[in-house]
Image: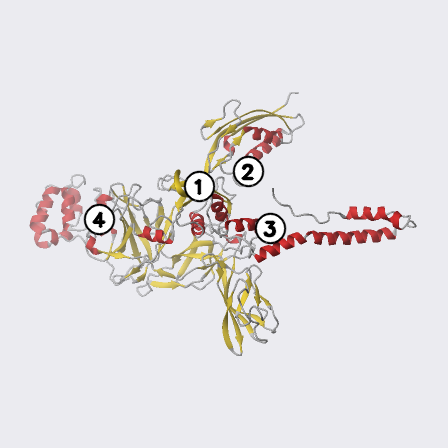
Amino acid sequence: MAFEAPNLDSRTFTELVNEARDRIPRFTPDWTNLNDSDPGMTLVKLQAWLTETLLYEVNRVPELNYIKFLQLLNVTPKPAEAAKTELHFTLKKLDGDRDALRFFIPKNAQIEADDPELSTPVIFETDSTLSALNAIVGSVIASKDAGMALVSHFDSKKVLTRFDHSFYPFGDSPVNDAICYIGLLLRPHRKAGVDYSQDIFPSGELDLAVSAVEVFEKDAEGSTLEGPLGKQSFLPFEIAEQQDLLAWEVYTGSDFTDDAHWETLYPPVDESAALSRSGHLRPMLADGLSQISLHQLPRSLWVDMGLNKIPTSGQELIDDLRDTELQYDVDNIKDISLEIIVPADSLETVQGSCGSPGELADALKSNVGVESLQLAGVTREDWLGLDVGYSDPAVPAYSMAWVRVRLLDASVYQPKALNGFYLNTVSATAVVTRVQESLGHSDGRPAQQFTLAKKPVYYSPQTSAPDIQLDVVEAGESVSWERVDDFFATDSHSTVYRLDPGEGVVTFGDGVNGRIPVAGSSIIVRHYRYGGGADGNVGANTVSKIKTSLPQVDSVTNTRQASGGRSLESLENAKLRAPHDLKTRDRAVTADDFAFLAKQTQGVPVHTAYALSRTALDVTTQEFISQDGAVTVVILPANAQQLTPQPTEAQLEAVCEQLNRKRLITTELYVTGPRYLAVESLEVEVRVLQSADLQAVSDAIYAKLLSYFHPLYGGEEGRGWPFGEDLFLGSIYDLLLDIEGVRRAVSLSMKLDGVAAEQCQDVLPVPEGYLLNLSADVISLKVVYDER
């Protein structure tokens, strides 16, 4: 049984007045006029009002004691959290031969959200310096079945690369040594008449962003991925082991098919965990990268892609003339400028041997030689004009540097669909950096407090600490003081201070615990970051107003919605959280511990978390598996805009990082989104009072049913349908009868995920870890007047 705080005195204003009126005849019998108009009664009511106010304060003493107790245990409201997103920069047309090929977009570059619904501006700052390249990903060739597939589409008019659908980089059934090629097109905007042959791919860091398919996006088959998505939670050393599944290599030679001409790259950190999630790879490129266009790649690669390549060598032309599948004939051979291809001294002999394509091939090989044929003078349009069956894929016509990733161990690799690879992308956070802020001067008194101009102060989730530097300038010397959570274990010489992030209040010591700044000294905050809150969760393609001067940048946007923003935790919620904090003591042992700690993940608005003990997750099929030593945590995000809310990949990753710090190293951990059992049909017949409005009753029934089954605010208590809660038809009858105007619920039948409720059956079972999903289009409602 839960303890309830006692009400020390529950008397109200009316009760106090009545009590005083009852005592007047006993103590002052001469006072006979007890009407409200009597001046004495006015004084009685005044005293009753003052007494009620005092009693209210007295009754808050237990609450005050509770809060003070929590403060002793260092239980405080969680700071505000800032939203994060990925920003993609589009460069200007740097098409001059002297325009820079590499430049830097600085850390803390500011981009404002362009959203008219925001009451206050929301500004995002880049989290790191971006080494931007005057280049784009021009082509991507992925493994597919037993061959290859060109999965990108180059738009030559807009000079950008599109991915028409998601793809598996190593195919949906990967094998060892499967390869994915990535072509990097340098200076994609090119001006006619300018010589770009001297462009050399710049050495240095290559920041390659990987975009994995998110829930509610299109999968590799073109269907909407409704979820759930799940992943295994890896510890840092396990993530490093994941990197060993792939080999990253760059082309530096003259033979594309020879492994000896590919140099190994060593990305220092693979944020994508072997292409299993979105993230960045930042390998260092050396000088001397070879560049070759896709049209010049070996014919064997084109055959693997199911394409007919235009000949780029004499041997390829001869092979094509002998290929019966290509529709060559003597007439269209003459359309080719043989005068360009064949040397003048051999032209007459070759033209005399044009009886058939095969004869021409023999004549070219015997009379001219493969190496002497000059194909460079014939344009791609000329070859396509022959209409013999050559392919014309949408690819850049220019040479590209090539990176490839090769799968080393397919036995443990988990296929993941990708949206594509991108350059010039960097993460950003909805905070603002403020520098050189003067807080004032010390007056030499103990426990001085100063307030920052902006709040709340941003706490980094990675360090659980604010990025702030505070200096005290005494006698012309500036000294940085250290921020501490409390003044415990400090003395009168400790140069420390406390910070309240929500209110932005800086507190110094009292001379016993913590030093007092010398009177007259200046208090200067060299830099700090402020911001956070749910306002930062702006939609996709809204973070686009450039605030920092970036002369090489044409535009910027966020391709996905920003997420993770949350306001300062309320005192009431902190009080409710405190008992669970004391119970878990920051360690996840039981299933309830995992569920509770998952809800405390910074930046993830988790509505409900449910942990399945002795359960693993097959991340390929997303099915639950019974396994000792494993725990699977199901996350339901507080996203009311979705009928079936699912966590994003970033939210799943944040929960994994949170629980990794709490779990035992021997526990195998999986995190996933909820599974939904669909209500396939729900037929209801009710009879209503003659005075009722049929349309109003129908609307009320629809609203009640949809609300009752909603994962966030459904169920008996209206706080969301509990995971694995069985469905009782009797509860639905009670729901219908509680609607105003309904007299009788005549019939109710429903089918849940293919299982129909039988006659007289009152319960439909819901498996552990599942929720229900009801859409309005499956409800069949009959509302008629009651005849009696």
Task: Looking at the image, tell me whether mark 1 or mark 3 is earlier in sequence order.
Answer: 3
Identify residue type, mark 2: Gly
Name the residue tied to disc 1.
Answer: 613
Could you classify mark 2 by the number of other residues whose Cα lies within 10 Å: few (under 14), some (14-19), or many (20 or more)? some
Measured along the vertical axis of the image, is residue 324 above or below residue 11?
Answer: above
Secondary structure beneath disc 3? Answer: helix
Secondary structure beneath disc 2? Answer: loop
Could you classify mark 3 by the number of other residues whose Cα lies within 10 Å: few (under 14), some (14-19), or many (20 or more)? few
Number of labels in the image equals 4
Q: Which mark is residue 714?
A: 2
Secondary structure beneath disc 4? Answer: helix
- Whole-percent x, y for residue 483 in the image: 51, 65
Q: As rendered, which of 544 and 723 lies closer to the eye?
A: 723
- Whole-percent x, y for residue 234 in the image: 38, 49
User: Outermost residue, bottom direction?
Assistant: 475
- How far apart are labels 4 and 2 at the CA level? 67 Å
